[in-house]
Amino acid sequence: MSSRPTCRRSVCDGRRSSIPTIRRGAARRRPRRRGRDREGEPMKIATVDVDVLRVPVDRPYVAAGRAVDANWHVLARVTTADGVQGFGYIVYPRPDLMMAIGHASRELGEHLVGLSVLEPEAAWDRLARRGDWVGPGGLLHCALTPLDVAVWDAAGKTMGQPLHRLLGGYRDRLPTYASDGLWVSLSPDELAASAKSHVDNGFPAVKLRLGKEPTPELEARRVHAVRAAVGPDVRIMVDATESWSLTRARQTGRILQDSGIAWLEDPVHHLDVAGLAALRRRLDIPIAAGEHLYHLDAFRSLLDARAVDVLILDLARVGGVTPWRKIAALAQAHRIPVCGHVVPEIQVHLLCAVPNGYLVEYVPRSAGILKSMPRLERGELVAPQKPGLGLELDDAAVRRYRVSS
């Protein structure tokens, strides 16, 4: 008997088709690997657990006009019938709606039971449809993210591959920059000392916040203080935290043009796409934005308007790994590099998986619940090489910081 594919007649025009007939017998003879049940089906989720954690910070600070004394987490864990467990989480430095997000994740998580961790796209779509009455975006995406990350973590563990390789494997490390402890509440001298400490610890770049000072000249003084402390070779990024009007952003940007900053982030409100585009045209500084956006259409509008030079993706807001990949691909089509917002231990996997991954923002808000963080080597953050996220929860810390389950 011929081993060539069997041709079928097209139902459209009666012509012969070259589509081969799939012979199921060959598939049955393949050796069974871990992650498949007795019938050969992809492994299924048996249980889902969601906890809310309050992790105190070592030094309280002020960010975006709010006092911060703890990092709040919504932690999700999915366990399969054969015992593989994946976990994921989001983290914000204030409680606000985190209890509500935890409750929403818990309810959505019930609909993961019986689904395969090897089909995260189908799982995400099912949950998004279940919660679409409060979406797209907003609380729904924040509730989806811990579950989606947990499914991807379990998928990587099932396949025996680290997440960055499972998603594409473009590289295994990426340059990083320090962003922790460089808050708007610090004086110029305190800011300079904090930046110098990061550089001494091996970081080749730092990002500081602006938006507090009454004049553009005083804002620039903060940048100059950091530059004097770290020297000419360290890259400095500036985040205005959406604090300025378009006029104020233009005035401050003109003064900062001679400071050699690597980018100006969120100079105006994220919905002012026209304002961002105008600043990009008029200033000789790269414009970065995107961390406040939730869904693909909003990113498309930003990119189509040519409003940014660097796109920032917040994993919690976009809804997890599954939509993150699509937004990164859209940015690549526009020839725009992408960076992550916080959770560097997860973002490093995603950014290493795509050709337009640029820099990893290092803010270790979850170090208190993990046994270790990815290592820094010569200014680059190295993606963990163990399967899945390659991270391990500190179970004692999780129990200690749990406030709701």
Image (spheres, rainbow, N blue to C red):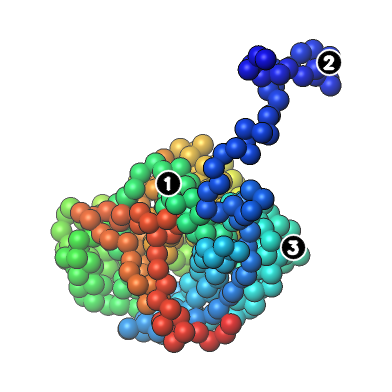
**Residue pointed to by mark 2:** 13
The mark nearer the N terminus, 3 or 2, is 2
Q: Position of residue 200 (x, y in %)?
A: 16, 65
Asked whether residue 215 is in view, the answer is no
x 17%, y 54%: residue? 232
Q: Position of residue 229 (x, y in %)?
A: 16, 66
The mark nearer the N terminus, 2 or 1, is 2
Look at label 2 and name its amino acid.
Asp
Query: In this rendering, would 22 be left or right of 401?
Result: right
Question: Where is residue 364, by image quadrant?
Answer: bottom left
Question: Where is residue 267, by image quadrant?
Answer: bottom left
Q: 130 or 241, which lies in front? A: 130
Q: 41 or 133, which lies in front? A: 41
Q: Under tag 3, what secondary structure? A: helix
Query: In this rendering, would 195 be left or right of 254?
Result: left
The numbered mark at residue 130 is 3
Depicted 100 relative to depicted 268: above or below: below
Q: Under tag 2, what secondary structure? A: loop
Question: Where is residue 318, by image quadrant?
Answer: bottom right
Q: 367 or 161, which lies in front? A: 161
The numbered mark at residue 165 is 1
Tell me how far mark 1 sits from mark 3, CA to CA.
30 Å
Q: Under tag 1, what secondary structure? A: helix
Depicted 276 relative to depicted 50: above or below: above
Q: Position of residue 294 (x, y in %)?
A: 59, 58
x 54%, y 65%: residue? 83
Query: In this rendering, would 83 be left or right of 361?
Result: right
Q: Nearer the viewer, mark 1 or mark 3?
A: 1
